[in-house]
Amino acid sequence: MDLDDLLIRYFGTADLDALAPEALADGKERIRVALGTDRDAGRRFALWALLHALGDAPDPAAVFKNPAERRAAEDYARAAERLERE
């Protein structure tokens, strides 16, 4: 999934800095709904990763029942946190 496509789909723009707080919250809610209803593992991971980047991702254990998918999300979160600290 392309990041700009995701941003436009859920927020109506690829420029999140231009969004009002309410529009940002609405877009995050649309992503959470899609995350809860989509069954494709790759799309679900992309949606979860986008929420993580926005500081609003649910715990991987609550989202990913498949152990490999859950580990991938946990690994991603740890790597993102390491990058943020550097």
Image (cartoon, rainbow, N blue to C red):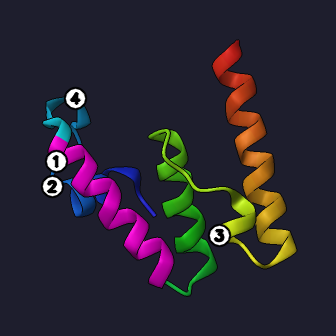
Residue beneath label 4, please? 17
Residue 7: x and y in percent read 29, 52
Amino acid marked by disc 1: Ala
Instruction: Report crowding for label 3: few under 14, some 14 to 19, many 20 or more residues within 10 A (C-alpha).
Output: some
Residue beneath label 2, please? 12
Amino acid marked by disc 4: Asp
Instruction: Give the camera-side residue of 73 and 65.
Output: 65
In the drawing, what numbered circle is on residue 46? none
Q: Earlier in the sequence, mark 3 or mark 1?
A: 1
Query: Judging from the image, what secondary structure is the residue with disc 3 in?
Result: helix
Query: Judging from the image, what secondary structure is the residue with disc 1 in?
Result: helix
Residue 1: x and y in percent read 46, 64
Q: Earlier in the sequence, mark 2 or mark 3?
A: 2
Q: Residue at x 13, y 36 (%)?
A: 20
Q: Earlier in the sequence, mark 1 or mark 2?
A: 2
6 with respect to 85 (left or right): left
Amino acid marked by disc 3: Val
Residue beneath label 1, please? 23
Disc 3 from disc 1: Cα separation: 24 Å
- Is 31 drawn above or below residue 21 in the view shown? below
Q: Earlier in the sequence, mark 2 or mark 4?
A: 2
**Mark 1 or mark 2: which is in front?**
1
Disc 2 from disc 4: Cα separation: 12 Å
Query: Judging from the image, what secondary structure is the residue with disc 4 in?
Result: helix
Residue 34: x and y in percent read 40, 75
In the drawing, what numbered circle is on residue 63? 3
Q: Please report contact status of discs 1 and 2: CB closer than 8 Å, yes or no.
A: yes
20 with respect to 42 (left or right): left
Numbered range of the magenta stretch = 22-37
Q: Judge whether residue 43 is colored magenta.
A: no
Amino acid marked by disc 2: Gly
Query: Dominant secondary structure of the magenta stretch?
Result: helix
